[in-house]
Amino acid sequence: MKSKEWLILNAVKAWLYQYQDKEEVELTPQYDKLHKELYNAYITKDNPVQKRGRPAKRQRKKETASVASGEKES
């Protein structure tokens, strides 16, 4: 279930998306300001980054093939 703040922020974003270039031009600066205030108040910028397990590493062979593939020794 989403919080009240998230729903309000989503409604403001939807209004800006729908009416930004239409007849409600005089309200756009107010909605932009409201969007910035709500975003800064309720959306945190320091979300923790989930770390994965150990990094995958390719297994290395101790010896390399001395003869290139496709060539045979005589």
Image (cartoon, rainbow, N blue to C red):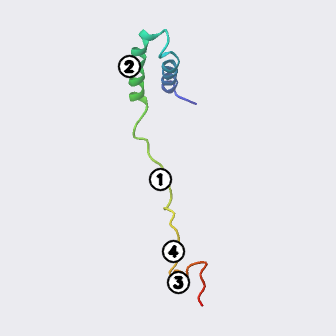
> Which residue is at the front of the view, 6 or 1?
6
From the image, tell me which residue sits under label 1. 51
From the image, tell me which residue sits under label 3. 66
Among the two numbered marks 3 and 4 on one chain, the one whose residue lies closer to the N terminus: 4
Q: Nearer the viewer, mark 3 or mark 1?
A: 3
Among the two numbered marks 3 and 1 on one chain, the one whose residue lies closer to the N terminus: 1
- Three-letter code for the amino acid on which mark 2 is drawn: Lys
> Which residue is at the front of the view, 15 or 22?
22
From the image, tell me which residue sits under label 4. 60
Q: Nearer the viewer, mark 2 or mark 4?
A: 4
Q: Secondary structure at mark 2?
A: helix
- How many other residues sit within 10 Å of disc 4, few (<14), some (14-19) or many (≥20)? few
Task: Give yes or no for contact between labels 3 and 1 (Cβ–Cβ under 8 Å).
Answer: no
Residue at x 50%, y 80% (from the top left corner): 62
Q: Secondary structure at mark 4?
A: loop
Tell me residue 3's x, y (percent): 52, 28
Residue at x 42%, y 9% (from the top left corner): 26
From the image, tell me which residue sits under label 2. 33
Tell me residue 30's x, y (percent): 40, 14
